[in-house]
Amino acid sequence: MLITFLSDFGTKDEWVSSCKGIIKSIAEQSEIIDITHDIESFNVVVGAMILSRASSNYKPCVHLAIVDPGVGTRRDPIAIETETGHIFVGPDNGLLTLAAENFGIKNVVKITNEKVFNKPVSTTFHARDIFAPAAAYLSLGKPLSYLGEVRDKNAIKTLAISFASFKQKVLEAQVIEVDKFGSLRLNIQKEEFQRYIKPAQSVHLKSKYFETSAPYVEAFGDIKAGEIGLIIDSSDLATIFVNRANASTKLGLKTGSKITVAF
C-alpha cells in the first residue's frame, strides 16, 4: 500500500531520509510519496490543513504525518483508520483529525506494540522510531490492532479552526497560511466571501502595516505584475496575492497576522 509523507523536517538534515530508510527496511517494496516537508516549523494547524487538502487526492493509503512539537512528552502516538480505508499515522495533537474526519473516523489506536518500534527509541525522533515503522507495517496489510491498544475515537485531539464572517460589510480576518509564493491564505471560506463579493469588485484591506484596495479576481494574470489582488485559490479560501511577487514580503504579513477586509 502507498505511503504519503508530510512533515516540518525540511531537507537540510537527514530526518526525512532516515524515516524512509526505516520504512524500506520493513516494507522494501513500499512506494513513498512526499506531500511536503516544508511545513512551517511546529505549525500543527498549517500541517493539518495541507494534509487535509492533499489526502483527498489519493485512493485509500497510509498517510504518515509529522509536525510534533510535543515529541517525547505524554502526547500519544496514534493511528486512525477511516471508513474509506485511508489510515493516518502521527502524533495525537490535532494534526491528523482534520484530514481523517473527511473520510469518517472508524477506529483509533495508541501505538504501544514495542515489536513495531525501531529500538532504542529516541525521545526526540519518534518519527523514525515509532511512526515510520508503524506506517510500514500498515502498508504491508497489518491490521490497525497490531499497532497497539484501542483508543476512544471521540477522545483524540481536534483543532478549532475558526473562520471569519462578515459583519456590517467588515470582516476581521487572519492569515492562516503563507504558501511558497508568499500568497496569504485567510480564514475566509469561499462561500462566505462570494456571498458579498463578486469578481472585479474591489475590497478594502487594512492591517497595522498597510492600507489599500484590491480587486477580487478569478486568475492571477487578471491584474498586472506587482499589483495586489484577492482570489479564491485551490484550497477554497480567500487569498491575498501579488502577481509575480511575494505578498508576505511586500505587505509585511505572516501566519497569524490580522487584517480587515471591507467592501
Image (cartoon, helix red, strand yellow):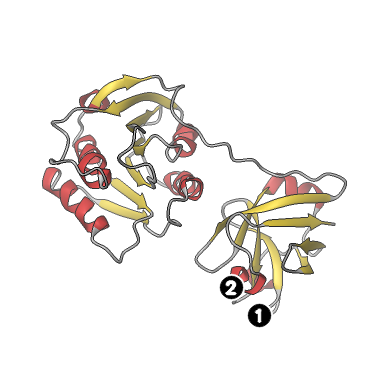
Above or below, 207 against 109 in this view is below
Residue 225 is marked as 1
Residue 231 lies, in percent from the top left, at 67, 61
Name the residue: 80% across, 54% down: 197
Name the residue: 42% across, 38% down: 96
Q: Residues within 10 Å of mark 2 (few under 14, many from 20)?
A: many
- Mark 2 or mark 1, which has the lower sequence index? 1
Name the residue: 15% across, 44% down: 27
Disc 2 is placed on an element classified as loop
Above or below, 99 against 13 in this view is above
Q: Residues within 10 Å of mark 1 (few under 14, many from 20)?
A: few
Residue 246 is marked as 2
Residue 190 lies, in percent from the top left, at 68, 49
Disc 1 is placed on an element classified as loop
The image quadrant of residue 40 is: bottom left
Viewer-proximal residue among 123 and 214: 123
Residue kind at label 1, given as amino acid type: Ala
Q: Image quadrant for the C terminus?
A: bottom right
Q: Is residue 95 left or right of residue 19?
A: right
Name the residue: 50% across, 33% down: 158
- Contact check, label 2 and label 1, Cβ < 8 Å: no
Residue 73 lies, in percent from the top left, at 33, 37
Residue 209 lies, in percent from the top left, at 72, 68
Q: Image quadrant for the N terminus?
A: top left
Residue kind at label 2, given as amino acid type: Asn
Q: Is residue 232 left or right of residue 72?
A: right
